[in-house]
Image (cartoon, rainbow, N blue to C red):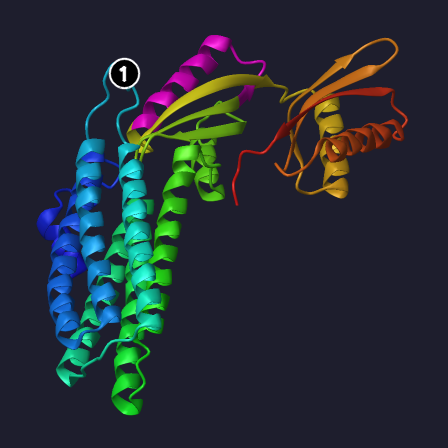
Amino acid sequence: MTDFLVKKFVKDYEEVEKVSVRTAYGVLASVTGIFCNVLLFLVKGSIGMFLHSLSVTADAFNNLSDAGSSVVGLVGVKMAEKPADREHPFGHGRLEYIAALVVAFLVLEIGFTFFKEAVGKILDPQEMKFQMLSVAILILSIGVKLWMAYFNRKLGKRIDSKVMLATATDAMGDVITTSATIASLLVFHFTGQNVDGVVGLLVSLVVMWAGVGIARDTLEPLLGEAVTPEEYDRISRFVESYDGVVGSHDLIVHNYGPGRSMASIHAEVPNDVDVEISHEIIDRIEREAAKKLGIFLVIHMDPVETRDAKVLEVRQKVVQILEALDPAVSIHDFRMVSGKEQNNLIFDMVVPFEYDEKKQEDLKRSVSSLLKLTGENYQCVITVERSYIGK
């Protein structure tokens, strides 16, 4: 069913890097969510009023809030499609995250409202009714929500959409809340115990927790996330695949919405190659990164030694020392400036983000001390950088 809907309503569905294609996926997911959730609200709301069940009614309004979330998501996706302008040169893609944040607050508000009503019903229980047909319809709604979770997760992974993945998680939360609602009806039917208020309380907590989860997932890209190891490797391998580039480092990615990223990276080029030749290679990488990766890439060119055997030997010594001290640390921009009395080793040392200043200084002192034990008169000039790679 998922593949059928995608092929039917998303033109060029395989070209997921295109903004227009991502928008079509977002519209499909939103419209599907609106249709399914409004249908579930009407069915569950009718059952809840008939049974005088707060837990069923709360579950129904949770579905209505999901439909409202899909409407907000639809508006956000369409607004995010707006092209760049003078005031917003990187486009309006982050509006999709803002829309998801609005959805999170809507979900939290619904959950809090039913939390208050559940507390009231625990203190003053009301008469309930039981109908097996109603239970069967609720079980059917679980099936619908399971499919919606699968549908949004599959589409979310396909276009790398945090909003769709959050929607999938929310749908699984609905499966849990509806299952709890069915449990309360069955407990009432077989034991006569009215646990509707307690179950309604649990349902409201699950709904609020889903809202917190959606808010967390959408705030992260708005605040600025570290690049994932997978994305770091993908961009680095692309840059290093070109002849004339011998390495890269210092990749930073800025997210301006799904499918709209800007990145900067340092590309290492041989220092004995004409600067104009290297510059032409760098320009070509930047142009092709926009076409093949969908990323506006800015590259800083770093000339490095590739032929001097002595410099390469000393660099390898430094690498070996750091591997023995701490495998999580790396170096780049290595240079050796030889003098009459000492040889200056100048390089940048990249450490994990959580390393404090004391640990950084300890590493610098250890490297310098171990190098002096080699018998050479080395003086280290080390610049410490923190890694921008996330977990």
Is residue 236 highlighted in magenta? no
Q: Residue sitting at 28 percent across and 41 percent down? A: 102
Q: Position of residue 342 (x, y in %)?
A: 85, 14
Mark 1 — residue? Answer: 87
Out of 113 and 323, give the one closest to the viewer.
113
Q: Position of residue 142 (x, y in %)?
A: 23, 70
Q: Residue furthest front?
A: 124
Q: Residue furthest bottom?
A: 190
Tally the numbered discs. Answer: 1
* Neighbours of disc 1 within 10 Å: few (<14), some (14-19), many (20+): few
Q: Residue sitting at 27 percent across and 54 percent down? A: 110
- Per the rendered image, the range of residues in magenta is 268-290
Out of 262 and 122, give the one closest to the viewer.
122
> Is residue 199 depicted above or below 208 in this figure?
below
Question: Main structural element of the magenta stretch: helix, strand or loop?
Answer: helix
Q: Is residue 248 left or right of residue 1?
A: right
Task: Indicate the amino acid at tag 1.
Answer: Glu
Whether residue 385 is visible here, answered yes or no, is yes
Q: Is residue 115 left or right of residue 315?
A: left
